[in-house]
Amino acid sequence: MLPLKWEKRRQEYLREREEWFNELMEAGRTMAGRRKFLKMAASAAAAAAAGAFAPQSFQLVDVVDAAGPTPGPAASAAQPFTFAYISDSHLYEKTLNERFVRHLERAVADINALDPQPDFALYGGDLAQLGQPGELKLGAEILKQVKAPLKMMVGEHDWFLDMGDLWKELFGAPQYSFDHKGVHFITLMSVNEKDFWTKAGLTPMQRMQIVAGLDDGRQSRFEVGEEGREWLKRDLAKVTKTTPVVVFSHSPLYKYYRDWNFWTDDAELVQALLRPFNSVTVVHGHTHQVLSNRIGPIHFHGMLSTAWPWPYAPSGLPKLTVPMNRSDPFNQTDGMGDGTINVNQSGYADKEYNLWNRNPMTVSEKYLSSNGALDRPAKTTLPTY
Amino acid sequence: MRRTQWMKIIAIAVLFSAGAIFFQGANAQQQEPKHPSVPADGKEMVVQLCDGETSTKVKGVRPDERLTPEQAQSVSNELMRMWMDKVDPAKAAAWMKEQSAAQSPQSQTQAPARKPSGSKSEAAAKTAGSAEQANDFTGRDFSIWKRELEREIKYGDEIFHSDKLIGSANGIACAMCHPNAANTHPETYPKFQVQLRRVALLRDMINWCIEQPARGKRLEPDDPKMRALEAYIMSQRKGAPMEFGKH
């Protein structure tokens, strides 16, 4: 039985296709020669409707069962638990764009419907599209409805209008850490950019718009920066090497594709601070796609957006990433969603992508730990062109 | 290349340039095209090549008659032969090379049918392999083409990145989902889209995106913005193999 949420959309496609076949049949009545072909076409539609095969744009990704908790490289004190995430909602004011608002509300409803409830929910950054007070406040208002405790992370779209003033007022410090069930959590501010605006004489809004343009080469690259790295070093100094560490970062904390700022300029320096730990997991936003990577002991998981999916970059895709299907332009929430992260006893996690119009996809600890040898998620049927 | 193939190429070339071939004398009231090489006498059909100069008279055919396919083929062969003999040998050779390459990439080394040895076109064939090929284009031509094309692409780039220029009612711009026009795959059109109920061209999908996610007004196919958007999108996919019909 197919989950209801995208079964509806699939049926819509099938109905549209059948309607079209019927139109052809109607037209074909006057052309005896074409009738035989059209009959075949109609029977193909009937077969599709009966579930004999899935139409291509709704080719489904099989669910891969998440691996059970596996013992970590060294015994850790972590108790398995789950947290949920919502990310990259890019809100405009409701009067301008109601659709993005609906998407965020949908994600909030998804998280609130989880049973059992997650231990907490992470908001992964880019709550606003252009850092406007109306956008950030609207987002804060909607996120108040999340029942689980909420951890906020900042994104570049929230930051570069007023350099974080309002965001900090609404949500607090952008960089903080906490401990939960034996795991040390760190939220990093990783979307700093070197000053490209003062010399160019740009207004705050111009600066914001340049940063908001993914392929706008006038901006600098993301970085945690020296100050941030010092803070991280001090924070990690208190943590034993056997304690699992989970880092929240808006930018990926590795180098994927520079032209789109799928990139952290000082990634190697940050990774060097994390490498001494037995188990490190980075959960990042910004890339709006299913994204998996592993560098040494560090596992990386990208988050989905609720606003729009991004195509995979032309180069630099980590080899452990099993891409999600290219999204269907006729299906306005395809490639979007939210998700949950199940932290295992090892401190590593099984990441579930709750794609709104597809089967969910799980990237397990086992898959990344085995460098892709075990528990590989099902391959996409519609890769990026 | 075999002779028959070569004939087919010429036939195609002539058929495609049919608009440029003038059938003389059909209507005395109309402005009659001039035929510098063969003056029309109103009794026999004169056919002119698309170079505007080379003409030939069709024996036994009145100006108002219609040529049979065989007659048309023979006329086009004759005109092409005359043209080959007349033009700069290197230019003729380059043309032939291009034609044969377009028709059959494997057979471009074989010489097409032409006049007996000693003619200009024979000499042309000998120079065909050399690196230098004569053309009428100067550096100025290339710089104008480049500048004009870049201007069009730049305008498309601006529209692609601006919710205002695209006429979006909800703040959404093309580049928000398609950085550097990624995943617009212009090389896969035309292709049939059930949702549009017809074979879609790139412009249909551009309009789909303007109307649906961006909530704007669709552009006419010849709207300067549509033309610029197409230019920009294609400029970002240079080198991608043509794969029309790919889903």
Image (tube, grey):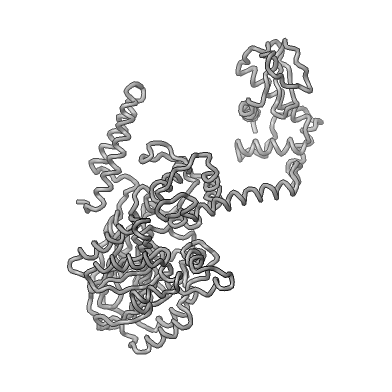
Q: Single out the residue that lies furthest toward the right.
A: B118
- Hey, which residue is sitting farthest bottom in the picture? A238
Task: From this view, report whether residue A35 is shown above or below residue A215.
Answer: above
Which residue is rendered at x = 49% and y = 69% of the image?
A204
Locate the N terminus of chain B and report the quarter of the image it occupies: top right
**Percent position (x, y) of residue B135?**
75, 42
Q: Residue A174 occupies which quadrant of the picture?
A: bottom left
Query: How many numbered circles are shown?
Result: 0
Tell which of A129 and A316 is nearer to you: A129
Residue B78 visible in image:
yes
Front-most of residues A376 and A135: A135
The C terminus of chain B, quarter of image = top left
Residue in the foreground of this view, choosing between A73 and A163: A163
Q: Residue at x 74, y 35 (%)?
A: B92
Q: Nearer the viewer, residue A110 or B193?
A: A110
- Residue A22, given in percent of the width and then of the height, sits at 29, 31
Quarter of the image where one finds residue B200? top left
* Residue A126: quarter of image: bottom left
Q: Is residue A285 visible?
A: no
Residue B84 lies left or right of residue A383; in this view the side is right
Residue A94, above or below A196: above
* Horizontal and vertical percent position of residue A282: 37, 74
The percent coordinates of residue B189 (x first, y second) are 47, 42
Q: In the drawing, does residue B19 fall left or right of residue B243? A: right
